[in-house]
Image (cartoon, rainbow, N blue to C red):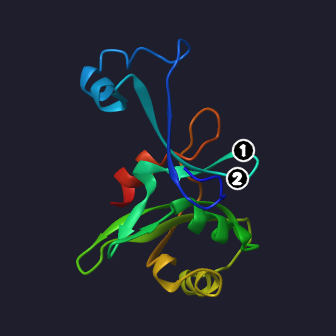
Amino acid sequence: MPWDGESIGEIIARGDNIMKGYWKLPEETNNAFKNGYFYTGDLACVDSEGYILIVDRAKDIIISGGENISSVEVENVLYMHPEVLECGVIAMVEEKWGEVPQAIIALKPGATATEQDLKDFCRERIARFKAPKSIKFVSELPKTGFGKILKTELRKQFS
């Protein structure tokens, strides 16, 4: 990838410190390894000094009408809203566009932002097609033991 801080590619790695495979998951292992390289599923760009910035996970990219939408980009905009405590953006199946962004949001205590408020907020800051088409409100989002939002659980609950 060019070191321009914009071009996005998948991080791949190989070496003695890389795992041999997924425990008792041979198909997953075969999908993750190609020509001795481990394909991480992390999408990143490289800046002019060689620093790598992870921008999203390949499986979290939303493809809407042929356009790739980074769920992280939409989440970052939502986190700018003063009433958003936490959020996760996932793909929602849509007949015309294939997929569209759907946001699952937990508001801060006492917050009163509406679905329309948050849609308008996003549309003022990112391209209209990237703004969530649907917003669901929850009291909290499912997380791992390390506090990372479980998008797999969001997909199960809201797909």
In the image, 129 versus 9, the foreground residue is: 9
**In this image, 74 relative to 12: left or right?**
right
Q: Is residue 99 above or below residue 90?
A: below
Q: Amino acid at mark 1?
A: Tyr
Q: Picture coordinates of residue 52 (x, y %)? A: 66, 44
Q: Picture coordinates of residue 108 (x, y %)? A: 72, 65
Q: Amino acid at mark 2?
A: Asp
In the image, 85 versus 95, the foreground residue is: 95
Q: Picture coordinates of residue 54 (x, y %)? A: 61, 48
Q: Picture coordinates of residue 112 (x, y %)? A: 68, 79
Marks counted in the figure total 2
The residue that disc 2 covers is 47
Residue 51 tag number = 1
Residue 127 tag number = none
- Give the position of the C terminus as an image quadrant: bottom left
Is residue 88 visible in the rendered image? The answer is no
User: Label 2, label 1: how many angstroms apart (C-alpha)?
Assistant: 5 Å
Q: Residue at x 34, y 26 (%)?
A: 35
In the image, 128 versus 44, the foreground residue is: 44
Q: Residue at x 26, y 20 (%)?
A: 26
Q: Is residue 53 above or below residue 132?
A: above
Q: Residue at x 61, y 85 (%)?
A: 117
**SS of the residue under disc 1:** loop
Q: Is residue 101 above or below residue 27?
A: below
Q: Tell whether label 1 touches label 2 (CB within 8 Å).
A: yes
Q: Is residue 71 above or below residue 27?
A: below
Q: Residues within 10 Å of mark 1 (few under 14, many from 20)?
A: few
Q: Residue at x 51, y 85 (%)?
A: 128
